[in-house]
Image (spheres, coloured by chain):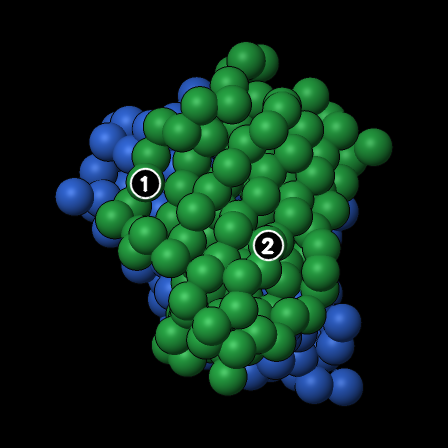
Chain colours: A blue, B green
Amino acid sequence: KQEVTQIPAALSVPEGENLVLNCSFTDSAIYNLQWFRQDPGKGLTSLLLIQSSQREQTSGRLNASLDKSSGRSTLYIAASQPGDSATYLCAVMSSEAGTALIFGKGTTLSVSS
Amino acid sequence: DTEVTQTPKHLVMGMTNKKSLKCEQHMGHRAMYWYKQKAKKPPELMFVYSYEKLSINESVPSRFSPECPNSSLLNLHLHALQPEDSALYLCASSSPQTGNFGYTFGSGTRLTVV
């Protein structure tokens, strides 16, 4: 059964730091991996989608990489800002679950000014 | 239009009430989903509709009844809920017909059962 793990569970950094969030999954038979951001009490905002054939995707200060063979993805945030404070969720679309997403428990990021 | 719209944003209902949650998208996506999210937990899948047909029901109690009247609209009918059903209910859509499969989520309905 596919399981998704995110490390760390929480992270506090000062403004301006570069940081890396980690996501691992147990079954490499995935269609894609998607990173989301969630503000408290709000819905999920898609940040980056990496198809299984891709190695990385970039959007502004965000860069996500995918190593399917080792079951790992990282989300790199450059020059962090207080507005980046949120929970970041990693999710995989796995062949065992059709088009349903399997989520990790998230990393809660706090960026102080 | 690149949004998934959910209404209402907040709902308080008694255990004997019947209510419905609504989700709408006009992106031409042919897969739509209901997820339930409790505080400080990741979203949990409830239902998947693919091409307007129910394809996955994750052993959800019958007090939750999904409906997909057309390719743009998804409803979740609620009846005789319990206080433990209080949660954020999220709707999402994706585009299996293009092979993209990237999800777009709505902003959710915050449900409180009293």
Q: Who comes first in sequence, dot 2 or dot 1?
A: 2
Between tags 2 and 1, which lies in front?
2
Residue furthest out toward the right: B1
Determine the residue positioned at 41% across, 79% down.
B83
Instruction: Using a 10 Å C-alpha cutoff, classify the residue at mark 2 as few (fewer than 14 neighbours), some (14 to 19) or many (20 or more).
Output: some
Residue furthest out toward the front: B16
Above or below residue A41? Residue A34 is above
| Marking on residue A104 | none
Q: Chain of mark 2?
A: B
Q: Is residue A111 left or right of residue A8?
A: right
User: Type of residue at label 2?
Assistant: Ser
Q: Which residue is mark 2?
A: B20
Residue furthest out toward the left: A1
Q: Are marks 2 and 1 in contact (CB under 8 Å)?
A: no
Instruction: Tell me if residue A95 can be seen.
Output: yes
Q: Which residue is mark 1?
A: B57
Instruction: Give residue A89's position: percent from left, percent from top.
Output: 49, 58
Instruction: Give residue A87's position: percent from left, percent from top.
Output: 55, 68
Above or below residue A32? Residue B14 is below
Q: Is residue B71 left or right of residue A101?
A: right
Instruction: Give residue A58's position: percent from left, percent from top.
Output: 65, 39
Please identify the quarter of the rendering in which residue A38 is found: bottom right
Please identify the quarter of the rendering in which residue A39 is found: bottom right
